[in-house]
Image: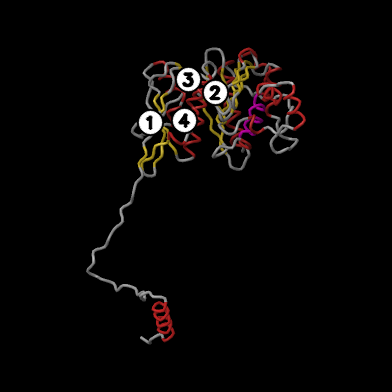
Amino acid sequence: MKRNKKKAKIKKWHDYRSRKIGKSPKRNKRYNPNKNPIYKRRRYEFVEAEPIVAPANICILKETEKSLNFFSELRRERNISKIGRICFVQIDISRVVEFDYSAICVLMAIVQDLKAKKIYVRGNFPDNKKCRDLIVESGLLTYMRDEKGKPFKKAEKSDLLFIEKGAKKLTREDNKQISDSLRKAAKYLTGEEKHLPKLRTILLEICGNSIEWGDTTNKEWLLGILYEDDKVTITITDVGKGILKTLNQKFKKVFMDTLSLKTDADILKGAFVQKYGSSTREINRNKGLPSIKNGFDTGVIKNLKVLTNNVLVDFEDDTKTRIMRRGVFKGTLYCWEVTNETIKKAI
């Protein structure tokens, strides 16, 4: 092999420079075929957080603040356990004796959002049989794992529809699923499948807002339908920013509201009559909230309740409206009922 003279000159220059500054010349070590190879062991991080103990009553509409504190702890970084690359949150719901459907939907939305971030939720069963059956029938176990990290058996009676979109649009398939869910609800109450355009419009407006401005990992929202004796309960859950965080309130209106000592509940009610603009300042936004309020006023829906940020507004009974500490809940929950009477007005 022909010697590279240029390379030899460069080595000679580097040797001269090293001796000049008082250092020994560096040379690559020769390969030793008899030397045993050294394998670096992979280090696995192990972080074990304490399980989050749920309160006895997880009812958002009754024990609101206690339930929201539990959900808030579920999303805190300090409660995430880690074994290698597997991250999970451990919850203990064995002492729960009452669990309403709205709370189950919020819990499912949080579990799904954590799952999108590759954080799994592990838990156990309530000791109370009635509460345990409700959790099994609701479909919550579809998105959870047991204490050993194994998936639960899937069983559900209520209709649950997760829709997530990064394109910020409701597809034709999404519209079809919503329409099918409403026809099924109408058949349960009246015995006949009926198209409910007014109720469908409300759902599309709210769900469109949730996908576009929800600020969750996959822009998802959850539509839950619970079939009861003489009514159907519909919930829409979004665990993003919440309504009060996304409102773009003009300075003059905020100043006047401050002078009149208006609360967060008053500001939220103002959003339902299109008093405030959206966060993008577009005139075509913020139609979902007025549409749901109009549906309640015209009798398309009844017993409307809205929970967002630190406010729970009961449109049926204003005395049950509550204001809690700020930051207690991140997201929005809509809950209303549909009966035989409302279906006649929804056609």
Q: How far is the residue under mark 2 from the one under mark 3?
A: 19 Å
Please report whichever mark, 1 or 3, sits nearer to the chain's N-terminal start.
1
Q: Looking at the image, is mark 2 or mark 4 nearer the viewer?
A: 4
Q: Name the residue under label 2.
A: 225
Q: Where is residue 197 in the image (x, y as percent from the top left)?
A: 67, 25
Q: Which amino acid does label 3 sit on?
A: Ile
Identify the image quadrant of residue 170.
top right
Name the amino acid type tagged 1: Glu
Residue 222 has which mark?
Answer: none
The segment highlighted magenta reads 199-210
Left or right of 293 on screen, residue 55: left
Give SS at disc 3. strand
Position of residue 229 relative to residue 220, above or below, is above
Badge 4 is on which residue? 74
Under tag 4, what secondary structure?
helix
In the rendered structure, which disc, 1 or 4, sits on the residue that comes first in sequence? 1
1 vs 2, front mark: 1
Residue hosting label 1: 50
